Amino acid sequence: DVKVTQSSRYLVKRTGEKVFLECVQDMDHENMFWYRQDPGLGLRLIYFSYDVKMKEKGDIPEGYSVSREKKERFSLILESASTNQTSMYLCASSPAARRQETQYFGPGTRLLVL
Amino acid sequence: ILNVEQSPQSLHVQEGDSTNFTCSFPSSNFYALHWYRWETAKSPEALFVMTLNGDEKKKGRISATLNTKEGYSYLYIKGSQPEDSATYLCALNAGNMLTFGGGTRLMVKP
């Protein structure tokens, strides 16, 4: 069974704080993704990574950065949190780039920025 | 950015009703269409991956069809049960990434 875990289910931070969201997968997947989900907007891709130390911008990268130092771990960083980054954040992973491949999701982190 | 649309946005049905909802997407550069079910407080879970025009897939009471020429997929639930209450997401793979629709939130009343 593929398992994708995220470091926190709920997080409350203040405007201007640096925030780290961690994601770990245990199935040796090459690809990892960070999404945010807001009501009525579906999942929007922030960043993704196809390999260690590799990152690509998704559709909404502004205000975020990522780090992939190890294959199993993909971190999302909010350098200076703002209230418009209050959202549900989902991490996903999938095997090496075959276009039909299913993505496996973590349970999500609900972030509130005050 | 590709435009993937789902309708309706939300749906309330009675237990035992059958229901369906739609995912529409641009038909150019199509590789695959994914359906996910996302229950509250859980991870989104893959239902189907559909790749061929005319594909029809089934899992218990849930089935899906695909029309890549006109750019739509239907998800059907036969005899809805309260445990079917969830948000159903479709996602288009037109390259190496998934583009998600806004989801259909289904609530099944006992």
Image (cartoon, coloured by chain):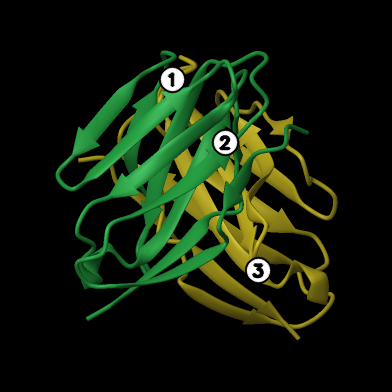
Q: Mark 3 points at which residue?
A: A87
Chain letter, green: B
Q: Colour of chain A?
A: yellow
Q: In this view, does B40 lie to the left or right of B83?
A: right
In the displayed structure image, the side of residue A80 where residue A105 appears, left or right: left
x, y percent for residue B77 = 28, 51
Q: Are labels 1 and 3 on one chain?
A: yes
Q: Can residue A104 be seen in this view?
A: no
Task: Indicate which disc, 2 or 3, sits on the residue closer to the N terminus.
Answer: 2
Q: What residue type is labelled 3?
A: Ser
Q: Image check: B80 left or right of B74?
A: left
* x and y percentages locating residue A23 in the rendered image: 48, 51
In the rendered image, which quarter contains the C terminus of chain B? bottom left
- Chain letter belonging to callout 2: A
Q: Are marks 1 and 3 in contact (CB under 8 Å)?
A: no
Please tell me whether mark 2 or mark 1 is closer to you in this view.
1
Image spot of residue B6 (x, y percent): 58, 48
Marks 2,3: beta carbons within 8 A: no
Residue A69 is marked as 2
Question: Label 1: which residue?
Answer: A100
Q: In this view, does B99 lie above or below A87?
A: above
Label 1 element class? loop
- Which of the two marks, 2 or 3, is nearer to us in this view? 3
Amino acid type, label 1: Gln
